[in-house]
């Protein structure tokens, strides 16, 4: 899973300026989904949805910033697959609880973890430490704000080692890479391909963490570097002769930033981007590959979302999903068996930090071709027909009052009060310094 990788930033979704041959290969040898949704338009709530199978109307973590953690009663994908005999590993950005909380990955079903626990820590690629399970792994070569050990490379190596170590076992590997989240920073060997190719904005106002003079080239280079590590994972599966036993998903935690979108078309034809409940903020790429099982070179317009991943993986892995979750299994659809889209509502809500159990600030919902967005609590619903207006340019609520009212009625039933809110403002324990962290 990428971090802020937009719908339009892959070659298989229409990107022409940034090379992504290995993810494109997953699409060519598997299935590409055109209507797949993240759990939220920002990081932590979306990851909570992925892990638990609840949309944000029922999930525990509904705010961003690192101030909320998974609860002991939350049951994650890792816990479910672990009970079915899988070894579980997570390498990358967690964002659902620090080491001293109930949300730490080793307390939520993962046998192994390496990477960032706090999501603000993950804003930087040359930190002075990463977490190795419950212990800090000090990166001595980065102390004093030096840039010697690129965190993405360390995370990729640990993911590859996990596959080698457990090749004889059934395993669940979750790799939430931090790329291409800001800061825009990548080693020089990746910059060579893109340096000087793009007209760079001066100053680059879209990214206050920008640490390179060519942020657009850096963004492209980061994406291609991560794509290369996806390729290393695919190659290792083949080398170990477990390729045809392994299903691979590639997706993103939410839509891409709007900064630079005119050049790279980060979110393709979609309106909005990260932080928005328009399609560009929540519709994300998904390609799935399983040789001989998932049909190759297929495009599927199934409407499904992060909360469906848990029951789908449980079904594929011979495990039992939690009862009462919002997600449903699409294992048969993945394997190419005929099926129609279920008639159901998809739901997202946004909570401002530390609002307790009060109503959500903004909401979105979709059913069939219809999509609604409410930007603020007292504003009327905006209504769009995505089949006729993918870019959400025409609000047709006044012309379709019965459809808008049906959504209004359903929204009253869509949520419960969150079980997990911080008692104080989120702990920004890693201040956003332009040059990284000072020990």
Image (tube, rainbow, N blue to C red):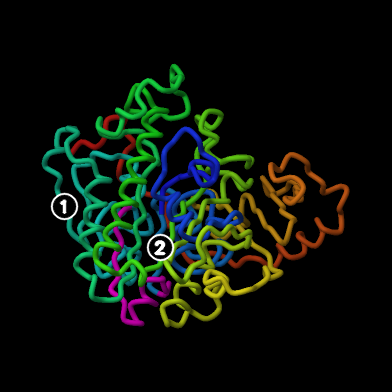
Query: Mark 2 sits on what residue?
Result: 248
The outermost residue toward the left is 140
Q: Is residue 67 above or below residue 123?
A: below
The reply to whether residue 202 is visible in this rendering is yes
Left or right: 273 as drawn, with respect to 226: right
Query: Mark 1 sits on what residue?
Result: 137
Name the image quarter holding the N terminus.
Answer: bottom left
Q: Is residue 360 above or below residue 389?
A: below
Out of 20 and 438, give the one closest to the viewer: 20
Magenta residues (range): 73-92
Q: Between marks 2 and 1, how big is the CA–CA gap?
A: 29 Å
Out of 343 and 19, give the one closest to the viewer: 19
Given this view, does label 2 or label 1 mark the residue nearer the observer? 2
Is 418 colored magenta in this rendering? Answer: no
Q: Earlier in the sequence, mark 2 or mark 1?
A: 1
Which residue is painted at 43% across and 18% down in the image?
203
Q: Is residue 326 above or below residue 32?
A: below
For residue 365, which quarter of the picture? bottom right
Image coordinates for residue 162, horizontal then vertical, percent: 23, 64
Image coordinates for residue 187, horizontal then vertical, percent: 25, 33
Quick one: SS at disc 2?
strand
The reply to whether residue 39 is visible in this rendering is no
Image coordinates for residue 367, horizontal then vertical, percent: 71, 61
Left or right: 167 as drawn, with respect to 172: left
Image coordinates for residue 183, horizontal then vertical, percent: 36, 35
């Amino acid at each position: 899973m990428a971090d802020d990788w937009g719908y339009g930033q892959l070659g298989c979704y229409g990107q022409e300026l940034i090379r992504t041959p290995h993810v494109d290969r997953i699409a060519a040898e598997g299935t590409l989904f055109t209507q797949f949704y993240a759990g939220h338009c920002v990081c932590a709530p979306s990851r909570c949805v992925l892990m638990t199978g609840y949309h944000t109307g029922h999930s525990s973590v509904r705010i961003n910033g690192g101030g909320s953690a998974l609860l002991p009663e939350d049951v994650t994908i890792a816990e479910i697959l672990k009970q079915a005999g899988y070894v579980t590993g997570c390498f990358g950005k967690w964002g659902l609880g620090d080491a001293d909380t109930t949300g730490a990955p080793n307390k939520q079903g993962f046998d192994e973890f390496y990477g960032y626990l706090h999501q603000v820590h993950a804003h930087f690629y040359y930190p002075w430490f990463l977490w190795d399970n419950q212990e800090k792994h000090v990166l001595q070569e980065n102390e004093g704000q030096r840039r010697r050990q690129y965190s993405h490379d360390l995370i990729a190596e640990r993911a590859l080692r996990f596959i080698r170590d457990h090749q004889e076992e059934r395993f669940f590997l979750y790799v939430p890479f931090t790329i291409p989240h800001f800061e825009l920073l990548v080693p020089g060997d990746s910059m060579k391909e893109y340096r000087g190719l793009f007209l760079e904005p001066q100053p680059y106002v879209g990214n206050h963490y920008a640490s390179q003079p060519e942020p657009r080239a850096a963004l492209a280079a980061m994406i291609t570097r991560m794509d290369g590590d996806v390729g290393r994972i695919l190659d290792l599966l083949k080398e170990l002769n477990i390729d045809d036993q392994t299903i691979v998903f590639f997706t993103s935690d939410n839509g891409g930033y709007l900064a630079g979108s005119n050049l790279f078309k980060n979110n393709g034809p979609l309106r909005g981007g990260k932080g928005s409940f328009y399609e560009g903020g929540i519709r994300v790429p998904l390609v799935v590959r399983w040789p001989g099982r998932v049909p190759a070179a297929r495009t599927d317009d199934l409407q499904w979302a992060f909360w469906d991943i848990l029951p789908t993986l449980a079904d594929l892995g011979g495990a039992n999903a939690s009862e009462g979750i919002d997600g449903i299994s699409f294992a048969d659809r993945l394997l190419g068996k005929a099926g129609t889209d279920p008639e159901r509502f998809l739901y997202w809500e946004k909570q401002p930090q530390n609002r307790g159990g009060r109503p959500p600030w903004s909401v979105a919902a979709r059913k069939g071709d219809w999509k609604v967005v409410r930007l603020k609590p007292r504003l009327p619903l905006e209504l769009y027909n995505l089949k006729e207006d993918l870019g959400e340019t025409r609000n047709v609520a006044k012309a379709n009052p019965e459809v808008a009212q049906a959504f209004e009625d359903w929204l009253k039933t869509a949520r419960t009060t969150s079980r997990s809110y911080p008692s104080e403002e989120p702990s920004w324990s890693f201040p956003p310094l332009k040059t990284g962290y000072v020990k």
